[in-house]
Image (spheres, grey):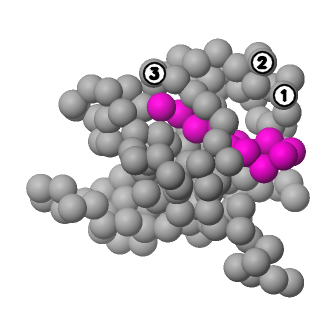
């Protein structure tokens, strides 16, 4: 499924501290490309595995932000994009912060992976959903989106 995506995501409600867009980069065999975040203290979840993506800039659509982040982080221009899900998370920071996240499915091929150049983070790797779930340091909202996508047929039969 592909689409423009910008008008497919409703957007956050009031009281949102940060708006983010993320890519579920999925291979034909069902593995997900994840970013190993830098291990520095000034970022959220240092050293964790997460989806590629980031903050939505003012005036930018969630899809445009996700596409921009992919180009900035791994020099990848997504051909096909489909809005998948969105969620709001309340982070137990001091003070607490409510973030809104939009997730997009982005199919990738082996040839795409070969051309990607990592520009942000300490690494990238492909994970089967079960292997990602076994990792001790994974962004929990990203893991939830990956598992929901991987298990979509069982969770949401049509």
> Residue 92 lies in what quarter of the image?
bottom left
Q: Which residue is mark 1?
A: 110
Which is nearer the N-term, disc 1 or disc 3? 1
* Position above or below: 19 against 137: below
Name the element at disc 1: helix
* Position above or below: 72 against 21: above
Name the element at disc 3: loop
Specify start and end residues of the magenta stretch as a single range.
25-36
Horizontal arrangement in the rendering, residue 42 relative to residue 4 (left or right): left
* Position above or below: 87 against 60: below
Query: Do the residues under discs 1 and 2 have CB atoms within 8 angstroms?
Result: yes
Q: Which mark is residue 82?
A: none
Q: Which residue is mark 3?
A: 122
Mark 2 surroundings: few (<14), some (14-19) or many (≥20) residues within 10 A = few
Mark 1 surroundings: few (<14), some (14-19) or many (≥20) residues within 10 A = few
Name the residue rendered at 85%, 33% in the picture: 109
Horizontal arrangement in the rendering, residue 40 relative to residue 77 (left or right): left
Q: Which residue is mark 2?
A: 114
* Position above or below: 24 against 46: below
Q: Position of residue 17 (x, y in %)?
A: 31, 57
Q: Position of residue 94 (x, y in %)?
A: 12, 56
């Amino acid at each position: 499924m592909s689409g423009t995506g910008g008008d497919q995501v409703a957007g956050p409600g009031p009281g949102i501290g940060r708006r983010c867009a993320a890519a579920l980069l999925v291979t034909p065999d069902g593995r997900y490309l994840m970013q190993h975040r830098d291990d520095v203290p000034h970022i959220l979840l240092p050293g964790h595995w997460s989806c590629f993506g980031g903050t939505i800039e003012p005036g930018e659509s969630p899809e445009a932000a996700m596409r921009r982040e992919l180009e900035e982080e791994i020099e990848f221009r997504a051909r096909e994009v489909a809005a998948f899900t969105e969620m709001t998370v309340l982070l137990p920071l001091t003070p607490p912060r409510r973030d809104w996240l939009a997730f997009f499915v982005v199919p990738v091929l082996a040839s795409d992976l070969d051309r990607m150049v990592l520009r942000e983070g300490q690494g990238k790797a492909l994970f089967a959903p079960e292997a990602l779930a076994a990792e001790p340091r994974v962004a929990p909202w990203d893991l939830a989106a990956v598992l929901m996508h991987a298990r979509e047929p069982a969770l949401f039969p049509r």
